[in-house]
Amino acid sequence: MRFDVITLFPEQFRILSREGVVARALSRGIAELRLWNPRDFAPGPHRRVDDRPYGGGPGMVMLFEPLAAAIAAARAASPKSQVAYLSPQGTRLDQDAINDIAAKPGWILLAGRYEGIDERLLERCIDQEWSIGDYVLSGGELPAMVVMDAAIRLLPGALGHERSAYEDSHMSGLLDCPHFSRPEEIDGLRVPKVLLSGDHGAIARWRRQQALGRTWLKRPDLLAKMTLDQATTLDQATTLDQEAR
Ligand SMILES: CN1CCN(C(=O)c2nonc2N)CC1
């Protein structure tokens, strides 16, 4: 899977290639990342990438021409990729959306800055607009990294234990179950006995019950979204899990 990111701050993306799941996926060729700086596509000696907004008002707007040229160059390099702009006005991303994103061959992510981009880019050059949440950040770089992290970890081979991605929160439509590790007791707080029993069926049932209970208490909206067939799939997965262990 390939990501092309259009950003005025390519250095920010160094963190992705340093350590962790994404860095490992990049080093193994499971995912690719190429960065495009609009300033390299800005004409004239000053290579302007922003200017004042028509109609007045605070801040600056990113200019159409350099971004359109950078998008065209990225499209030429990644012809199978669609273009997505990260912004608070975009479609709010959830795990289902990330699953769909991860199923595509690649994405060109436009990370905006300042007050935003010239609106005509959305009409002429951008295929999708995504938001990572209803709050305003200082730029689109962190949202782009959030999308890359969430999608790349789903790719085959990206995580050590293939099933981990499936068992994570939200993958099954539920919140995650509680996790415990050594020691068995901390300040009178003991690890649930079932987790020490070695009975994998009982452990799987306990974990599913905990996930359902937590979701009911913390995010009942997720349960409302969950269809009966998903719940059945969850049961089947758990049964398969039991048989496999
Ligand atoms: C121009 N720039 C404004 C700030 N921004 C966001 O707040 C954002 N992006 O994706 N989800 C979000 N929330 C990115 C774009």
Image (cartoon, helix red, strand yellow):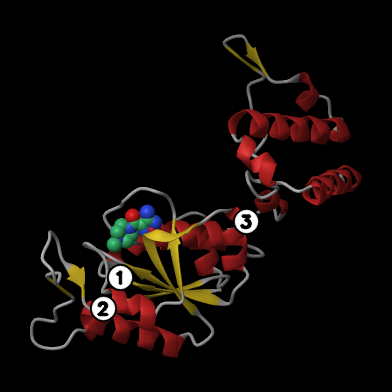
* Residue at left offset 88%, top offset 44%: 239
Judge: label 1 CB < 8 Å from ligand 1: no
Residue 7's tag is 1
Q: Which residue is mark 3?
A: 159
Task: State the residue at coordinates (43%, 90%).
Answer: 76
**Residue 97, disc:** none
Res 155 quadrant in image: bottom right
Mark 2 belongs to which amino acid?
Pro
In which quadrant will I find the C terminus?
top right
Residue at 12% x, 59% y is 58
Mark 2 and mark 1 residues within 8 Å of each other at the beta carbon: yes
Q: Quadrant of ligand 1?
A: bottom left
The residue carrying pointer 2 sits among few (fewer than 14), some (14 to 19) or many (20 or more) residues within 10 Å by Cα, namely many
Sequence-first tag of 2 and 1: 1
Q: Are marks 1 and 3 in contact (CB under 8 Å)?
A: no
Q: Label 1 is placed on what type of residue? A: Thr
Mark 2 vs mark 1, CA separation in Å: 7 Å
Q: Residue 38, labelled with which disc? A: 2
Q: Are marks 3 and 2 in contact (CB under 8 Å)?
A: no
Q: CA distance from mark 3 to mark 2?
A: 33 Å
Q: Is residue 21 above or below residue 49?
A: above
Kindly tell me whether mark 3's CB lies below 8 Å from ligand 1: no
N-term mark: 3 or 2: 2
Q: Quadrant of the N terminus?
A: bottom right
Compared across the picture, whether 231 is left or right of 28 comes to right
State the image coordinates of residue 80 (x, y, percent, origin top left): 54, 84
Q: Nearer the viewer, residue 15 or 203?
A: 203
- For the residue marked with disc 3, what is the amino acid? Leu
Residue extending furthest right? 243
Q: CA distance from mark 1 to mark 3?
A: 27 Å
